[in-house]
Structure formats: C-alpha cells, structure tokens
C-alpha cells in the first residue's frame, strides 16, 4: 500500500548532463539525446520506460523536460526517437516550433 502515495505524485525528472539524458530519479525511465551542430541541436534519439512504469505518462513527462530544456537553451530539436516524433509531437503540436530545419541556418 505504500506505493499508492508514490503513484499519486508526479515523479521528478532530472537532467543527467554527463550521460546526455533526462531521467527519473531512480534512473529507470529516460530520454537520451545527442548534441549536433556544435551543440545547437538536440537530437532526441531514444526514450525508454520499463514495463513496470508504463501507463503513467512518464515518456511524455521526459519529453516535456527535454523540450523545455531545449527551449530555455535556444536549441532546436531533431525527433529521431519514434515516440517523440510519432506520439508526443502528434499530441503536443505546440512544440513543433522547436524542430530543426535547414531553413534555420543563416544565409550570411
């Protein structure tokens, strides 16, 4: 019954800069990324949530943390991970403004 209280509160998502990922405090669910274009582009390459934690919205929370980080650090995003591109962005199109495109390059 102790798990009932834990399930009612949102898990804390932390930025693990060393391993280039956003993860739950227990490190079991995570979103991995690669920095490209001299660190100006965040390529979200993989999202993982263990079967014991699925259905709690963790993948979405990991994406929100990563997109907020990208926004606050003026990074554009490449959604290589199929969850990010096919599920998260479809449900949350407001984040599409951060997507990387060749048009963002300067013409100078």
Image: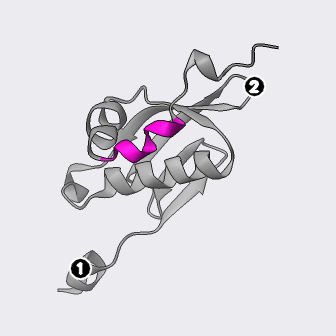
The structure residue drawn at horizontal position 44% and vertical position 37%, both measured from the top left corner, is 96
Lateral position of residue 88 relative to residue 62, left or right: left
Query: Residue 97 lies in magenta, yes or no?
Result: yes
Q: Residues within 10 Å of mark 1 (few under 14, many from 20)?
A: few
* Residue situated in front as seen by the camera: 49 or 37: 37
Q: Residue at x 75, y 25 (%)?
A: 38
Residue 42 in picture, x, y percent from top left: 58, 34
**Quadrant, the N terminus:** bottom left
Query: What residue is disc 2 on?
Result: 38
Work out which residue is located at the far right of the displayed protein and give it: 108
Q: Secondary structure at mark 1?
A: helix
Q: Earlier in the sequence, mark 2 or mark 1?
A: 1
- The residue carrying mark 1 is 3
Residue 43, x across and y down, in percent: 53, 29
Q: Position of residue 87 (x, y in %)?
A: 26, 38
Q: Residues within 10 Å of mark 2 (few under 14, many from 20)?
A: few
Majority secondary structure of the magenta segment?
Answer: helix
Magenta stretch bounds: 92-98
Counting labels gives: 2
Q: Measured along the vertical axis of the image, is residue 38 above or below residue 90?
A: above
Q: Which of the labelled discs sits on residue 75, or is there none?
A: none
Residue at far front of view: 107
Q: Height in image: 79 above or below 67?
A: above
Q: Residue at x 25, y 58 (%)?
A: 53
- Would residue 26 be found to the left or right of residue 39 on screen? left
Circles 2 and 1: CB distance less than 8 Å? no
> In terms of depth relative to the viewer, which is nearer, 19 or 78?
78
The quadrant of the image that shows the C terminus is: top right
Where disc 2 sits, the SS reads: loop
Q: Quadrant of residue 46?
A: top left
Specify the quadrant of the image occupied by residue 35: top right
Residue 13: x %, y % from top left: 48, 62
């Amino acid at each position: 019954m102790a798990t009932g209280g834990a399930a009612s509160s949102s898990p804390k998502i932390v930025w693990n800069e060393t391993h280039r990922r956003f993860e739950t405090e227990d490190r079991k669910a995570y979103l991995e990324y690669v920095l490209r274009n001299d660190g100006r582009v965040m390529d979200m390459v993989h999202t993982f949530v263990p079967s014991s934690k699925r259905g709690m919205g963790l993948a979405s929370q990991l994406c929100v943390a990563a997109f907020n980080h990208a926004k606050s650090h003026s990074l554009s995003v490449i959604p290589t991970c199929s969850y990010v591109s096919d599920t998260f962005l479809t449900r949350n199109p407001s984040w599409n403004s951060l997507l990387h495109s060749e048009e963002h390059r300067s013409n100078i």
